[in-house]
Image: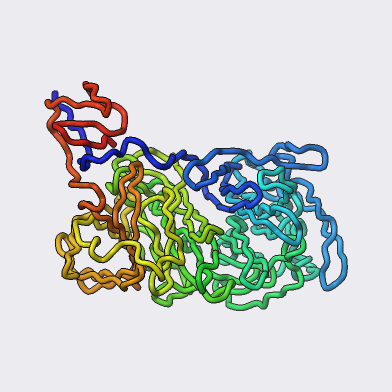
């Protein structure tokens, strides 16, 4: 019986030796940081997963240890029971901080709670005033009874010692005594209370009003102030100012009560709301100052792979982007829509009634040589982003795949700003491209005369049907020398000469982006590629499949009778490994 083999037809150029190495790691919720001392990038994620790399392509996994006064390798069930910070300064007066057993708080309901699966989404920053690496870690509880704690280390790889909590959630006088507000720092923040203030005593409706204390993002603003955003679904994403000297909450900063009922937008304990609310989906906030704005990333939807028509929250994970001129907002999308919701709205998947936030990328496949078939990407999110010291900006996220269960890996894409200052992600993984962020406005990376040709066009649309594992796939278009676009979509294109800014019009929709040269992973093939977005938040990608890319065409071969040879000229009966083969005098990539 004949078997159908799929190959990608290439021109006769050598691609058998790659100029880069992609060593993969699985780090869920990756937070990226650069360490000048080791000249390395580090990513830290949930369940103590972490990795290091010198080039953002080849990663090596490691585990950072926990430290206590008696050991440099404490187990999880011991590491968070006794904080080392004993006093703090409030209003110029030194006061007792107290001991906060983070494990006891999250395990208060019992029911077989296991800390090993509940150390979520750390964020790492170097605190110059402290001279320490600071890890902000979520200790998750089953009923919003979670906390974000601070641990510090002398080296980025640890060991990390528990210093104290930054914020708690889920306190409730009507539940078990173990989640009483008296076990938190609430009274240090808002003063002594005879009873839990009524606005917090909402029982099992906590998530409709108040934040969940997980998913921290800690950053310095342009003035040197230290901030932390946090939250997941529930009452939204919130922001607190931190004390630069201790890394903990700044107890001298006060927040007024603003908003009514579940529409609260400011609170003396939880700080200021910057996104979400009313239990709309949205988690994993990450904020980075790029250009003239602070950019806020939030991931909507469910983190799983999807494909279950009976479980809408299974899948649909997708990053959305907002920006602000201030670190604590207001954050708006390209349409000027605020990231804060005024009522519940479904904001992901095919039934969404609200699509606010720029959709920088979504589930996609049949793209290039790597993101194809079972390896097509989906449920990408819980990202971090780094405006790096090398002059480039990198988007780092975890992704699941079209047909590989719940397995996940880290991906890194370079990010650019279009003419309007919005972020657009490179269509392919970072593989050592040299273009820097500042080059986009000052150099033309692809000559106008080299742009006309055949292209693959991918549209990252909203409302993909994750319940049936829908993904975006490319169509074929032509960018013509007269500035028109033909093929599956029609329109026009133009460059701003002397820059890398491109404007693409498809129908009546205008996309603003950049045109650069990209490497099609896992080959050395270079291709002109564009990434652009429209004001509505939809992003598009494209890459040339003509002579500049060295790709003649993409085809599926059903002829299995002709002999196949490897690059050494040896006949191969049945090609089993991915790689380059020769058939009928032409080279093919088996993927």
Observer-nearest residue: 257 or 74? 74
Figure quadrant of residue 167: bottom right
- Name the foreground residue: 363 vs 224: 224
Q: How many marks?
A: 0
Location of residue 204 (image quadrant):
bottom right
550 to the left or right of 225: left
438 lies above or below 125: below
Query: Whole-percent x and y of residue 183?
Result: 76, 56
Q: How is the image coloured?
A: rainbow
Q: Can residue 351 be seen?
A: no
Residues 511 and 96: in front is 511
Q: Is residue 181 visible?
A: yes
Would residue 131 appear left or right of 419 to someone viewing this image?
Answer: right
Instruction: Tell me: residue 461, above or below residue 304.
Output: below
The x and y percentages for residue 379 are: 40, 50
Tell me the quadrant of the picture where the N terminus can be found: top left
Residue 452, percent from left and from top: 20, 62
Query: In the figure, 91 relative to 37: above or below?
Result: below
Front one among 40 and 305: 40
Q: What residue is at 75 percent from the left and 70 percent from the top?
A: 190
Q: Residue at x 53, y 76 (%)?
A: 325
Quadrant location, the C terminus: top left
Horizontal and vertical percent position of residue 583? 17, 31
């Amino acid at each position: 019986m004949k078997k159908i083999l799929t190959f990608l037809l290439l021109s006769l150029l050598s691609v058998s030796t790659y100029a880069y190495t992609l060593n993969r790691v699985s780090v869920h919720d990756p937070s990226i940081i650069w360490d000048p001392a080791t000249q390395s990038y580090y990513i830290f994620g949930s369940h103590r997963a972490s990795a290091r790399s010198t080039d953002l392509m080849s990663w090596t996994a490691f585990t950072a240890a926990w430290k206590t006064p008696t050991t440099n390798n404490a187990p999880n069930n011991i590491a968070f029971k006794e904080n080392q910070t004993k006093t703090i300064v409030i209003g110029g007066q030194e006061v007792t901080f107290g001991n906060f057993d983070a494990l006891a708080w999250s395990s208060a309901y019992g029911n077989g709670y296991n800390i090993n699966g509940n150390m979520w989404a750390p964020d790492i920053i170097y605190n110059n005033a402290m001279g320490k690496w600071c890890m902000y870690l979520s200790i998750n509880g089953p009923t919003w009874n979670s906390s974000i704690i601070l641990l510090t280390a002398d080296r980025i790889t640890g060991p990390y010692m528990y210093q104290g909590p930054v914020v708690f959630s889920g306190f409730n006088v009507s539940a078990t005594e173990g989640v009483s507000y008296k076990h938190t720092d609430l009274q240090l923040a808002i003063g002594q209370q005879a009873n839990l203030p009524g606005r917090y005593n909402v029982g099992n409706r906590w998530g409709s009003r108040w934040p969940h204390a997980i998913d921290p993002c800690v950053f310095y603003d342009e003035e040197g102030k230290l901030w932390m955003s946090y939250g997941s679904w529930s009452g939204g994403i919130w922001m607190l100012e931190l004390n630069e000297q201790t890394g903990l909450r700044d107890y001298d900063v006060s927040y007024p009560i603003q908003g009514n009922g579940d529409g609260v937008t400011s609170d003396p304990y939880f700080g200021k709301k910057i996104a979400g609310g009313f239990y709309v989906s949205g988690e994993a906030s990450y904020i980075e100052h790029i250009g003239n704005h602070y950019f806020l990333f939030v991931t909507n939807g469910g983190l799983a792979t999807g494909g279950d028509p009976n479980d809408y929250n299974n899948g649909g994970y997708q990053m959305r982007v907002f920006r602000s001129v201030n670190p604590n907002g207001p954050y708006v999308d390209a349409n000027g829509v605020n990231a804060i919701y005024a009522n519940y709205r479904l904001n992901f998947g095919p039934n969404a009634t609200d699509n606010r936030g720029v959709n920088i990328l979504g589930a996609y496949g049949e793209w290039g040589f790597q993101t194809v078939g079972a390896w097509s990407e989906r449920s990408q999110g819980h990202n971090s982003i780094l405006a790096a010291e090398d002059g480039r900006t990198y988007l780092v996220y975890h992704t699941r795949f079209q047909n590989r269960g719940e397995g996940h890996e880290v991906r890194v894409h370079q990010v650019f700003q279009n003419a309007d200052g919005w972020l657009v992600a490179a269509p392919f993984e970072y593989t050592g491209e040299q273009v820097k962020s500042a080059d986009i406005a000052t150099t033309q990376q692809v000559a106008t005369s080299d742009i006309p040709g055949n292209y693959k066009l991918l549209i990252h649309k909203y409302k993909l049907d994750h319940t049936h594992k829908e993904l975006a796939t490319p169509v074929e278009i032509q960018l013509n020398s007269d500035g028109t676009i033909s093929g599956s979509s029609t329109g026009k294109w133009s460059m701003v000469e002397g820059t890398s800014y491109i404007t693409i019009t498809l129908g009546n929709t205008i996309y603003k982006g950049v045109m650069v040269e990209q490497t099609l992973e896992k080959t050395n093939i270079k291709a002109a590629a564009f990434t652009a977005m429209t004001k509505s938040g939809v992003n598009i990608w494209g890459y040339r499949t003509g002579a500049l890319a060295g790709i003649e065409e993409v085809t599926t071969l059903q002829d299995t009778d002709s002999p196949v040879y490897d690059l050494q000229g040896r006949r191969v009966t049945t090609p089993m490994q991915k790689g380059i083969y020769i058939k009928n005098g032409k080279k093919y990539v088996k993927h």
